[in-house]
Structure formats: structure tokens, C-alpha cells
Image: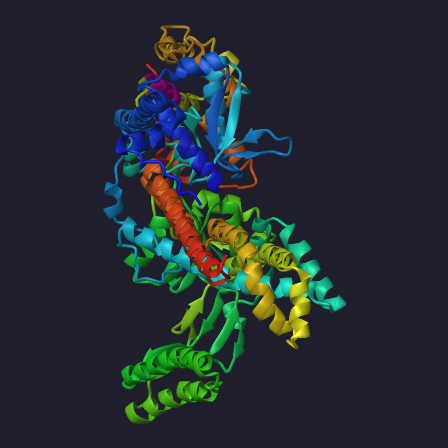
Amino acid sequence: MAIEARPPPAQIGAKLRRALGGRSGWKGLIAQLLFVAVLCWIGYAIVDNARDNLANQRIASGFGFMSQTAGFGVSQTLIPYSESDSYTRVFLVGLVNTLVVSVIGIVFATLIGFLVALGRLSPNWLISRIAGGYVELIRNLPLLFQILFWYLAVLGALPGPRQSVTLFDSFFLSNRGIVVPRPVGEAGLDGFLVAVLIAVIAAIVLPIVARRRLFQTGKPMTVWPWIVGLLIGLPLVAVLIFGKPFGFEIPVLKGFNFAGGSRIAPEFVALTLALSTYTAAFIAEIVRAGILSVHKGQMEAGASLGLSRGATLRLVVIPQAMRVILPPLTNQYLNLTKNSSLAVAIGYPDLFSVFAGTTLSQTGQAIEVIAITMGVYLLISLVTSALMSLYSWRINRSMGG
Amino acid sequence: MKRVSLIAAAAVAACVTAQTAGAQTLKTVKDRGMLSCGVSQGLPGFSAPDDKGNWTGLDVDVCRGIAAAIFDDPSKVKFVPLSAKDRFTALQSGEIDVLSRNTTWTLSRDTSLGVNFAGVSYYDGQGFLVKKALKVNSALELNSASICVQTGTTNEQNVADYFKGNNMKYEVIAFANADEAIKAYESGRCDVFTSDVSQLYAQRLKLTTPADHVVLPEVISKEPLGPLVRHGDDQWFDVVKWTLFAMINAEELGVTQSNVAEMAKSDKPELKRVFGTDGNLGEQLGLTKDWVARIVKATGNYGESFERNVGAGSKLEIARGLNKLWNKGGIMYAPPIR
């Protein structure tokens, strides 16, 4: 076999020319540089012109407003906030609210979506029809309509706080939301938390150890009784040693609303329900398509190995389906996050409502506020995308794909 | 909502880049043959379409007055319904020529939004609407209440000031438009609906049983409402300002929609100036000599417009109160036409 001479490595200049100038060489490179320069100039001209004209029309510009006092109340704040805080704080409050509703929505949408997909593929006639009906009903109604339905028709129909549905006089359900007792830390809290932490770490590490042992020695090791024992036993021991970790602040009706306790607002519940059930319908179809894309021989192979239907799905089919499922699933996650801005219709104080809504109209600085808001949604979406890509890359690698 | 704001912001960016300061709005309007007027999305008495789709209301009459002064035709107005949140952007971007949408005149709006308030067409204040069944007699009894409000209004900040000032707790739920806020209030999500008092009366009409709801006596803020224009076009600013003043002066002079033709023939020096039979005041504004007659013929004087839209002649039945003329016990006052 003759050894062929490899072509000499291209010089740096030539490489650069090929990369930037394409086939037309240096001429192409110059044309592209000119194009980029023109783009930059147009961008600069727009910004500069806008700044001049804003100044001429005496419209405030710049980001100085971010440190001014907001002066309005927000109904759901997961980080400390008062009316005398700045617009920056309002921005953070809104951002946290958006993230919370998105993350919880994504988790629920995924769970419901997978369940509905499996239901739709189930050999049981009734279950598959119910799942099919769910998908067709939910995905064909406008999301805004569904949000308003949950908010006004379902939660709005609950009784007022004075007539609320109650459980043990500590849990209350009314049109003001769900009010539950709030845990308040007491003396034994630190020891208790350490014990829980140790138990959780053990619960994560033990199965890994067991799995490694199984692969190395072929001996299965039963760990779950240990884990359960640790998770219950350790905190229990901590309570016995350090004393009561926390008490409960019981909510009481005082004036118009409940005082004390923790409250989940109806706006949040309605939005989460609507977003997760709506997105779940799309996810269900994606998962179903993914599962159907795996050759049915895989299912039969699993069955002939003596695996149950559930085990075959879990161990054989779904891991292969994931490769098909992930890209469109990412799209649904992004859609859910962006759709959360419909919160403005029911008064849930998400980023769009408190920042691109109230802040914008109070400061009047539309360009800055909208630019920041767009940047944030873009960033959230890109991060979600990146995480999903990472997951997808790991799956492909583990499957040798 | 989202798309509207984005488009509006893009429009601001685009127009701001294209437009030079001090644009000739009056000329633009004349060339276009149509006035573009920003109004509310439906607030009975101030700006709302009637059952035939014609816009009516006190704020609408200001726009019709401007159109009448320019074209001698009050129908040459294109009404653009705007949410509280989007209204300023629409004006800044040039989508509308004048914003007449129950908008409160405040210092920060006057200075940082690039707008000028042309006057006050209604002296209002913020109040609270509650269910009679709650048996609340004063706003000071509202500690711990849930309050529905429309976002993008001065109401949001006033309510924060008031409750903080009186050491009371509250929960505020802000909705993108007034209809959603009043719906949530009616469903029981909130104990209180807060807005300018005039709006409380107007919104109350939308409830299933208006009589079950009561407006509390406290007025917690000053809300002078009036039309506004873009900053930097003094001529247009004058046209809008003096249209409103003409309506108020007409009432003071006793000029009404029905007697305007006779009054125009009057020999009184004051009326001769107003109707342009003496001097050229209208032309100095960039309008015609008979501008006041055109306005009053189209909309009536301020008092007539008030009674027809929000006063005794309307469903709202709001008392004139502060909005009476200065010489009748109110504070409605316009500089003289001379």
C-alpha cells in the first residue's frame, strides 16, 4: 500500500482567507468587513439619533431611574420588598416571580405530559381515550382563555375568607388563595437541618455505591431499607437530642384577610395550573411521538426478556425516545416561560407585569425598560436551551450516539 | 398586552429616530384631514363607544372640539383606545396627536415623559368602592384589605402612600386594564376597588347590581385630569389648550349649542372677540376666526358636555362639585379670550 503524501498544512493567512473570505478570497473578505462596518454604523446612528431626539423632546433616558423609589405595592414578594425600595428591587421581585412560576410550571407540565402520553399509548381503551380527549381539548383552546377560566371560574367561585373551606382550623381555602401554617424555627432547628442533610447525602451516595458493587462483583445489594431508616431515623434522633426543631404559626382570620401563616395567592395557582396543563398537552404529543419513533421490536425484545410493560418503557424505550423528545421539549419549556407573561391579565406580579407594566408607565422610559425585559427573557430562554442541550449531549454520549 | 408594548416601544425607537423636534402637528393633522385622538378602552362618561359605535364622553368631546375647530367637522377624529400603560408611548411615538384619556397631571409626567398637559378638563380625586355588605363606612377601616387596581395609573402609588401613611396593611392586585380589575373585585378576589372617584361611578355601572356597592367618602388624592400633547410643538399645544379654554369660556359667557348662532351676531365687544367678528384671535392660533362657534356648535360648552356625559343627564349622575365654574362655587377657570 503506497503511502500518499498529505497536503501541506495551510498557512495562517490562507486559513484566515478561507474562513472569512470564502471562495472569493481577499476580495470577499474586504466586502464582508465593509458590510460589518456598515451594520455597526447603522446601529450607532440609531442609538445616537434616538438619544439626541429623546433629549430634544425632553423624554428622560438612561438607566438612572433604576435607583429611584418605586412607591407601589406588589402582592407576591418572595424576596423582601416594600414600597420604599427601588425599581431595581421591583425588577428582582418580578424576575423571581417569573422564574418561580416557570420552574414549577415546567416540572408539572413535564410530569403531566409524560403521564398523558403513556396513558394515550396504553392498551386500555378508556385510559387512552381519556388521555386523547385531554390533549385535544386543552391544546385547542387559547391559553389566555384557560388562564382566565382557572382564575375567574374556578378559583373565583371559591367562598370568601370568612366562609373559607378549612381543615383542622389551620388550612384554609378561599378566593384569597390557600393559607397554611408556617413553620417557625426553634432551638433544635440547626441540629435537625444537619441531620436531614446527612441523611439526604447518604440517600444519594448509597445507591451509587451499590451500583458500583453490582458492576464490579455482580452481587446485588439491597440499600433501600437503609435509606428509609436514615431519612426517618437521623432527624428523629436529632429531635430527641436537640429538642423541637420548629413550631407552626397558625393563620387566623383578622379583618378582611388571614394574618400569619403562609399564603399561596390564587393568581399564582391559576397561572401555574393553566400553564402546566396547557403545555402538558403539547408535551404529551411530543413524548408520544418520541415513543412511537422507537421501533416496536424494542418493545417486543423487552417483553421476551421477561420485563414488564412499565419496565420495558422505563429501561428500553424511553431512553431511546429521549433523543427525539428533547429538542421539541426544549421548545415547550421556552414557550411556557414566555407564556408566563400572560400573568398580566390576572394580576400575577411577574416580571412583565411589574417591570414592563407598572415601572414602564411610571417612569415612561419605554426603550430602556423594554430592552431590559427583552434581554432578561432572552437570557432565561438561552440558559434553558443550554441546560437542555447539555442534557441531550449527555444522553447521546451515554448511548454512543 | 405584550405585543402592543413591544410594537409601541419599537415605534418610539423608530419615530424618535426619524422625527425632528418641534414637528408641525397642526399642519400634519390638516394634511391628513383627520385628528388622531387617544382615549380609554371604554370608560362610560369619559370615553366609550355607544351602542351605534360612536365614541362619546367628556374626554371625547375635547377631541371632537379640536376637530371642529380645525375642520368644522367633529366627526373627523380617529379614536385610538389605549390602556393606561400604553397611552404615553402612543403619544410619544406620534401614533396619536392628542391624548384625552382621564390622565392625571403630575410633575414627573410633565417633565420626564416628553409631554405637556394642556389644562384640566375634570378635577378628580382617588376613592374606594366597597360592597355595602361589608358595612365599612370609612377608608380608615380598610386595614388588611385586598385591593384591586389598574396598573399604570397614579392610583397604584396613591394607595401605597395612603395605607403606609395610616399604618395599615393591604394587598394590592394590579390588573392590566380596568375591566379585569373590576371583574376580580366583583368575583370577591378583592374587598376594595380603587380608582379616581369619577371612574368608580362609571365602573360601578358595569357591575351586576350597582346598588350593592358604595363609594367611600374619603378622597385620598388630587387627580386633575386633562388632555396632553407631545412636548416641543407650541402651536399645537396652544390649539389643544385653547379648545378646552373655549369650551369653559363659552359656559361662562352663556354660549350654548342652541344659542350659538344668535350669540355670534351679538354686538357685545367680548362676544365679538370670541366669535371673530372683531379681531383675528382664531387666526393667531392657526385656526379660523369662527373657531369658538365651531367648537360650541359641535360639542356644546363645557357645562353642557359635563351634564350630557357625566352629570345629571347621564347614567353616572355625578355632581359638578369642584368642576363648577369659578364664579359658581367651583374651581373650573379659563384664561380670557382676548
Nearest the viewer among B64 and A104 is: A104
Start and end of the magenta stretch? B235-242
Q: Is residue A198 left or right of residue A290?
A: left
Picture quadrant where residue A261 is located: bottom left
Q: In this view of the protein, can residue B186 be seen by the observer?
A: no
Nearest the viewer among B321 and A28 is: A28
Please state the horizontal and vertical placement of residue A335, each as a whole percent of the image: 51, 50
Q: Is residue A355 above or below residue A256?
A: above
Q: Is residue A339 above or below residue B228?
A: below
Magenta residues, dominant SS class: helix
| Magenta stretch holds residue A28 | no
Please state the horizontal and vertical placement of residue B14, each as a whole percent of the image: 39, 26
Q: Is residue B145 above or below residue A33?
A: below
What is the residue that sits farthest to the front in this orientation? Answer: A1
> Could you tell me which residue is drawn at 57 percent across and 66 percent down?
A158
Q: Is residue B279 left or right of residue A154?
A: left
Please state the horizontal and vertical placement of residue B211, each as a whole percent of the image: 57, 53
Q: In this view of the protein, can residue A83 be seen by the observer?
A: yes
